Amino acid sequence: MATSYTNDIPFNANEHLLSNHLGSLVDECVKSHADKKAFSCVLPTGHSQTMTFGELGTYSDAVAAFLREELGLKQGDVVAVQAPNTLAYPVLAFGILKAGLTVTNINPLYTTDETNHQLKDSGAKVWFVIDVFGDRVAQSVEGTSVKQVYKLSLLDFFPAAQRMLLGAAMKYLKKAIPAFDGELAGTTRTVVATGLKHLKMVGETGRYRAEQSVQDVAIYQYTGGTTGRSKGAALTHYNVVGNLSQADRRDDNLEHNEDDAMLLILPLYHVYALAVGALASMRNGVHIVMMPVPRPLENLRHAFEKFDITILPGINTLYMGLMQESWFLENPPQSLKVCYSGAAPLQPATAEAWEKLTGMQIYEGYGMTECTCVVTTMPLNRPPKRGTCGTPIPGTELRIVDENGNDLPQGEAGELWVRGPQVMKGYLNNPQATEDSFVDGWLKTGDVGKIDEEGYLTIVDRIKDMIIVSGFNVFPVDIEDVLTQNPAIAEAAVVGAPDPSSGERVVAYVVSKDETLTEKEVIAYCRDHLTSYKVPKTVCFLEELPKSPVGKVLRRELRDQAAGLVNA
C-alpha cells in the first residue's frame, strides 16, 4: 500500500467541479463581471488600453463563430497562438476554446525550427502569430497542417489613432515589424469583424461545444524544450477546470474586492499564467494588467504608476530583479495584498529582502506543466514556511520514492510522484514518454522532494540537475541559496561539469553587485558555509544569467559553457 500525503479537505469532481468546459467557465466569468475591467495591456511607451469582461465575451464569441462558420473547423481541431501578453491573446485563446477546438500556445521566442516542430506535432490547422515575427512564417509552416495564418499585434483593440501612430513608429522608426514573408489570411481585427457578422446569425456559441466531453483535450501545452525537443502535454477540460476547482476548495483563499488588480508579467502561453494568472483571477473579477514586453524591468514602472497593483504572481528572478531597480527601491508599491511565487524555487534571501522592502511576504507554490499548474500551495492564513512550497491542494496525492519506486520515510528526499485530477492525459504523439512518466496512475515528476511532519513539501532540485561529486549527491539549489546570501552577489546558478578526478565538479555562475568581487573570494565564502565537496571549483562572472521568457535559468546553456571551460 503506497504511503501518500494529501489535503484533509475532500475533493469530489462530481460535486466540486466548477464547470464541465473551459469555454463555459469563461462565459460564467463574463456574466458575473460584465462591466468590470478584465484586461489591460501596458506598452513599454506607457500607452495602455483596457478591455471589459463584456467586451472580452463578445470578441471571443466572434472568434469562435469565425473559426467554425467561416473556416469550417471541426470539434477538436487545433489552433495555435504565438504571441506575448496582448489584449488579443485572451480573446483568441478563449474564442478557440468556446468553439470546441483545442488551443496550443507557442512561445514567441521559439526559433523557426522549434515553432515548426510544435505546429507539426500538434497538427495545428490555423496559426495566429505576432507581427514582429512575420519574416519567419514561410519556413515555420513548411510541412505542417497549417492552412491559414493570421497576424496579430501588440496594438490590437487599441483606439484607431493610437494604432496608426504607434504602429508607424514600431514599423518605420524602430524597424520592429518586418515584412510578412508568408501567405496572410487576415488579422485579428478582420477575424473579429467577420466573426461578429456570423455571431448575429448563430446567436450564441454554446452549441459548438455541446457534444464535447470533460475528458476532451482543451490545451496542448508544450514543455519548455530546455532539455531537448519539447513535448505536448495533453491537458483536458477536466484537468484545467479540475485544477481551478481544487484551488477553489481551499479554506484560506484570498478575499477579493472591487479594486483588486493583478500585474501579470508571466506570459499567457505558459500554463501558470493562463490557469492561475488569468482564469482563477477572472472568476473573482480581478482586473488583470498585462505587460507584453516586461524586460528591461524599467518597463514595469508604467504599470505600477498607472494601476494600484494588489496581486503579484512571479518567480524568484522577478522579485530579485525588481529589488535592483532604483525606481522600485525608492517607491515600493503600497497597494500589494499578496505575492505568489512558482515555476522555480524561491530563494530565502529573496523572500527576506522582499518582505523587508515591501512589508509583504511571498507565498510559494509548486506545479508543473504536466500537472496543469498547481500541485501545492502555501496556506494564506498563516505565515509562509520558508524553504518549502506549501501543502497539497485538495484532491492531490503526493509520494516520495527511491530509485526503485519504494516509499521513503517522512523527511527523506526522493523523487516526487503526483496523482490527482490536474495530472495530464499524456504526451501527444509520444506513447513511450507517456509510459515512462507514469506508474499505476502516478506521475513521476523528475523532481527531488521531501515532506516534513506538517505535510509541507520542499523541492530539493531536479533529478537531472543533481551533481555527483566523488559519489556524493550535490543539489545546485543548496549552493545557490548560500551564494545569494552574500551581499555582493545579485544572482547565482550552479551546474555540474565533467571532472577527471571527481566525476563532476561544481561550477558557479555569478552576477555580482561588486565589480571587485573575485573568484577566490566567492570560493572562500562558500568554504565558510558549505561542506567541502559542495564548494565550487570554478566561479564564472556574468552580466546576466541566461533565462527563459518565464524567468527560469537555462541550465543547459550553462552546462554546455561549463563543459567547455573544463575541457579547454
Image (tube, rainbow, N blue to C red):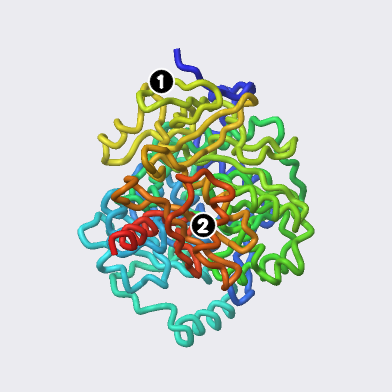
Using the image as rendered, state which of residue 199 and residue 539 is in the foreground.
Answer: 539
Mark 2 or 1: in front is: 2
Specify the amino acid type for callout 2.
Ile
Instruction: Write down the residue under mark 2.
Output: 523
SS state under label 2: helix
State left or right for residue 140 relative to residue 363. Answer: left
Using the image as rendered, state which of residue 17 and residue 325 is in the foreground.
Answer: 325
How far across and how far down the image is residue 376, in percent?
57, 35
Q: Please determine whether, in this image, residue 518 is positioned above or below residue 14.
A: below
Q: Please determine whether, in this image, residue 275 is positioned above or below residue 400.
A: below
SS state under label 1: loop
Residue shown at 45%/82% (left/top)?
171
Q: Give residue 182's quadrant in the image.
A: bottom left
How far across and how far down the image is residue 121, in percent?
27, 49
Instruction: Write down the residue under mark 1.
Output: 406
Q: What quarter of the picture does the C terminus occupy?
A: bottom left
State left or right for residue 30 relative to residue 242. Answer: right
How far across and how far down the image is residue 230, in percent?
33, 49
Q: Residue furthest top?
A: 1
